[in-house]
Image (tube, helix red, strand yellow):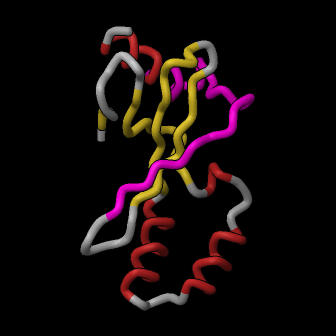
C-alpha cells in the first residue's frame, strides 16, 4: 500500500466516509517520557483495510488531567473520578484527527502530527 493510498484512506476516515473496524478490539499505544506524563493513543484498524492501523490522540483536557496527576496537582483517585465521568471513548480520544498510522508494509509507526 502506497503512502498516497494511506493518506487517501485517512482523509476518508476523518471525513466519516470510511469507518473504523468495530468488530475488533482496539489497541492502545503508550509513549513514556522521563520528564512528563505518558501519552496514550487509541489504535484501530480500518474497515476493509485490515493491514492498516490508525492512531488517535487524547484530547487536550484529558492530557491536562494526566499532567496534573504527574505533577501532584491531582490525586490518582481524582483522575479516576474524571475518567469515570467520561461517557465513551469519543470523550477521551479525538477521532476527527488521525495522528499516526502503522502498516506491515512500513517498518515503523508513521507520525503525522
Query: What residue lies at 53% left-to-right and 25% top-to-bottom?
Result: 13
Q: Position of residue 98 (x, y in %)?
A: 43, 36
Query: What residue lies at 36% left-to-right and 16% top-to-bottom?
Result: 105
The one of 99 and 50 positioned closer to us in this rendering: 50
* Residue 97 location, quadrant: top left
Query: What residue lies at 32% left-to-right and 21% top-to-bottom?
Result: 106
* Above or below for 17 versus 58: above
- Quadrant, the N terminus: top left
Q: Position of residue 5 (x, y in %)?
A: 38, 10
- Quadrant, the C terminus: top left
The one of 66 and 59 positioned closer to us in this rendering: 66
* Above or below for 69 versus 6: below
Is 74 magenta? The answer is no
Q: Position of residue 68 (x, y in %)?
A: 43, 82
The stretch in magenta equals: 11-32
Left or right of residue 111, residue 22 in this image: right
* Residue 95 location, quadrant: top right
Left or right of residue 87, residue 9 in this image: left
Is 30 magenta? The answer is yes
Amino acid at each position: 500500500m502506497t503512502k498516497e493510498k494511506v493518506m487517501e484512506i485517512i482523509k476518508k476516515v476523518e471525513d466519516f466516509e470510511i469507518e473504523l473496524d468495530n468488530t475488533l478490539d482496539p489497541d492502545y499505544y503508550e509513549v513514556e517520557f522521563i520528564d512528563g506524563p505518558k501519552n496514550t493513543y487509541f489504535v484501530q484498524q480500518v474497515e476493509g483495510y485490515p493491514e492498516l492501523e490508525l492512531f488517535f490522540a487524547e484530547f487536550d483536557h484529558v492530557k491536562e488531567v494526566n499532567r496534573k496527576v504527574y505533577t501532584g496537582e491531582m490525586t490518582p483517585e481524582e483522575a479516576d473520578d474524571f475518567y469515570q465521568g467520561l461517557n465513551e471513548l469519543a470523550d477521551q480520544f479525538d477521532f476527527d484527527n488521525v495522528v499516526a498510522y502503522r502498516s506491515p508494509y512500513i517498518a515503523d509507526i508513521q507520525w503525522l502530527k
